[in-house]
Amino acid sequence: MSARILEGKTFAAAFREEAGKRARALQEKHGVIPGLAVIIVGENPASKVYVRNKHNSCEALGIYSEVIELPETATKEKLLAEIDRLNASDKIHGILVQLPLPKQIASCEVEILQRIDPQKDVDGFHPVNVGRLVTGQKALIPCTPHGCLKMLQLAGIPIDGANAVIIGRSNIVGKPMAHLLLAENATVTICHSHTKNLKEVTKKADILVAAVGRPKFVTADMVKEGATVIDVGINRIAPKKLVGDVDFENVKEVAGAITPVPGGVGLLTVAMLMQNVVTACEMQLEK
Ligand code: NDP
């Protein structure tokens, strides 16, 4: 029997609606409009599209949005000064620096991202937020893995006691995903490029998350009958053709539930960013 398809648009709509509702509640209760600032450096066309999507999403939900465009030649000092200004702004509750950065400042990425006030770090990349997530404290959580967790929950997929296997250990997806599932009482295994007998490990997964960055890496013989398969991968194999890390057509015949690419996890990320802006605002008001 073919798997249940977990359509990203259904879950993203629910996450956006929740963010909008909470944003309205903040305005009614506290007279505060949550605000997001996105800094973009240079002319990367893909980055410009992502930034425009974030801005439009904010506008649709009544979230204040500022886009700060710096020239390709901007220095590290200029970017840090801009972050300092936004850290001090009452109108801004979330700050995001669009990656990748241009060559001359790319090597300073860690320093730049850590200059963002952890309370306004809506990407959840600051070590303070990473530490809070790992130690089970309230944190701003990276949008993509957080979206995956919330999707599993909303879809009614059992997590407590499940065997969860994550392929990939990046700071953006794999590691936070592991901590989120662990906090929900899954038994978590993280795989990476040095993992031996990968197929034996993935075959035991009730929940299998692929965050590898390799087209159709997860094949049907790696998946347990009835497992839930979350495909985080986005791989461009031709100018207009995106595929995930999972061989969707064959794996859907084995899995119990599966996310497609495109149309799956990719749609959750901006919706979760909206939630993070509202969460950041709520946390700042609690102080
Ligand atoms: P990274 O390249 O940072 O991490 C890839 C991980 O896969 C690494 O941990 C690597 O292991 C592991 N890996 C690579 N080859 C193998 C292998 N043969 N066997 C087992 N593990 C392997 O990628 P990201 O986590 O940033 O992204 C993963 C994918 O998700 C990409 O396609 C990216 O485009 C997509 N993505 C999608 C998002 C969305 O919004 N939907 C957001 C972010 C990412 P090792 O550590 O040993 O090198």
Image: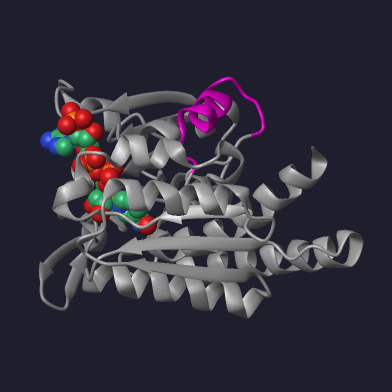
Residue at 26% over, 67% down? 71
Residue at 57% over, 53% down? 94
Q: Nearer the viewer, residue 197 or 32?
A: 32
Q: Nearer the viewer, residue 194 or 55?
A: 55
Left/right placement of residue 226 relative to residue 32 reads left
Q: Residue 97, located in which quarter of the rendered image?
A: bottom left
- The residue furthest right is 29
Quadrant of the frame with the N terminus: bottom left
Q: Is residue 146 above or below residue 244?
A: above
Quadrant of the frame with the C terminus: top right
Residue at 87% over, 59% down? 30
Q: Is residue 57 magenta?
A: no
In percent of width and height, residue 257 lies at: 43, 54
Q: Is residue 151 above or below residue 191?
A: below
In percent of width and height, residue 62 lies at: 68, 75
Highlighted range, magenta: 124-138
In percent of width and height, residue 249 lies at: 23, 63
Whether residue 214 is visible, yes or no, is no
Q: Ligand 1 quadrant?
A: top left
- The residue furthest left is 238
